[in-house]
Amino acid sequence: MANRSKLCIVLCLSLSIVLAQLVGAWLSGSLALLADAVHIFADAFGIAIALIAVTVASRPTKPQRTFGLYRLEILATVANGLILLALAVFILWQAVGRWFNPVHVTPGIMIAAAVYGVIVNLISFRILQSGATESLTVKGAYLEVMSDMIGSIGVVVAGIVVLTTGYDRADSIVSVFIALFMIPRILMLLRDSFGVLMENAPTGLDLDEVRQHLSEVEGVVAVHDLHAWTITSGMPSLSAHVIVDPDPFQNGQGTRILDELNECVHDCFEIGHTTFQLEAAEHAAHEEPRHP
């Protein structure tokens, strides 16, 4: 995986934030800083799962696993999203508790540890930005870093408010905003991941448009049983039954038609993994779905 090195760097950076914020929480007595450290640790754990998944997926596998272990990346992304969703609920629950039972903290140490988190997360954010559109795993890590950075900024703001006003409930208010910011993005990540597991058509792919393009290939009469899905991020696939007239097996046009069909979906829709079944017109009736 091309983005593996980026994920490794971000994982190390995230763990350095966890260490700094755990020490800061111990010295300052800040529950908000401790919660932010737990938040970032959970995200780092998710990145570690993703790295293990893509490493295993790239290795040779058993012959019966015809698509290898590529789906491990998606399963890791789903697990990561569920962890983040549970974490967001935990933050809301903690925010309510701190609202009714404010805890005084030492704001100077709290702010210093949180500022370190902001700076390092900003570096990680820039590292992952280019790969976020290429892989769901990187997209997940990108969203995690973004939520981590916002969380650290929230802790900085809460620390400044406590430092200047002594209003400890500022920590609860910021925590609620962090959780509410995270939840919609987590749900979108889970939606994309479950879409891959359900073998939905790739996002943005119009199957009617694909059918129209395929039908314009010379010799193609009709297209049916058209399916498109995603094996893993960046690996869309397509299969179709193509009715051809005259019979491609008699006039030797089958190779040309297959080449043009593959070129069509590759150039127009960026799909490289395809399976086409060419059928003579008289054979098409045998391919109609039958019901018991």
Image (tube, rainbow, N blue to C red):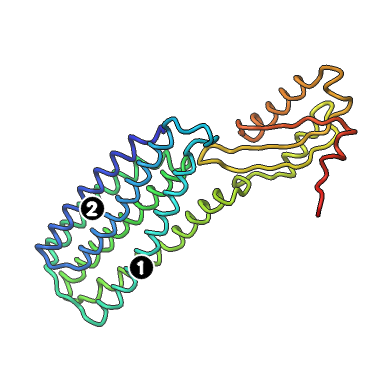
Q: Which label number is shown at residue 177?
A: 1
Q: Which mark is residue 37?
A: none
Q: x, y percentage for residue 284?
A: 85, 37
3D distance between C-alphas at marks 2 and 1: 18 Å
For the point 72% across and 28% down, the residue is: 261
Residue 18 vs residue 149, the one in the foreground: 18
Kindly identify the residue that appears in the image at 48 percent across and 56 percent down: 190
Residue at left 9%, top 62%?
Answer: 27
Which kind of residue does numbered mark 2 sit on?
Gly
| Mark sitting earlier along the chain (2/1) | 2
Quadrant location of the N terminus? top left
Residue type at the position of mark 1: Phe
Q: Is residue 148 left or right of residue 129?
A: left
The quarter of the displayed image where residue 173 is located = bottom left
| Among the 4 quarters of the image, the one containing residue 92 | bottom left
Front-lying residue, 170 or 211: 211
Crowding at dot 2, Cα within 10 Å, few <14 / some 14-19 / many 20+, comes out as many
Q: Are marks 2 and 1 in contact (CB under 8 Å)?
A: no
Q: Relative to 235, is 119 on the left or the right?
A: left
Q: Is residue 167 left or right of residue 266?
A: left
Q: Please tell me how crowded label 1 is: few (under 14), some (14-19), or many (20+) other residues with Cα within 10 Å.
A: some
Residue sitting farthest toward the left: 27
Q: Position of residue 30 (x, y in %)?
A: 17, 67
Q: Which residue is mark 2?
A: 117
> Could you tell me which secondary element the residue under label 2 belongs to?
helix
The residue drawn where x is 25% and y is 82% is 100
Placement of 157 over or under 119, stated as above or below: below
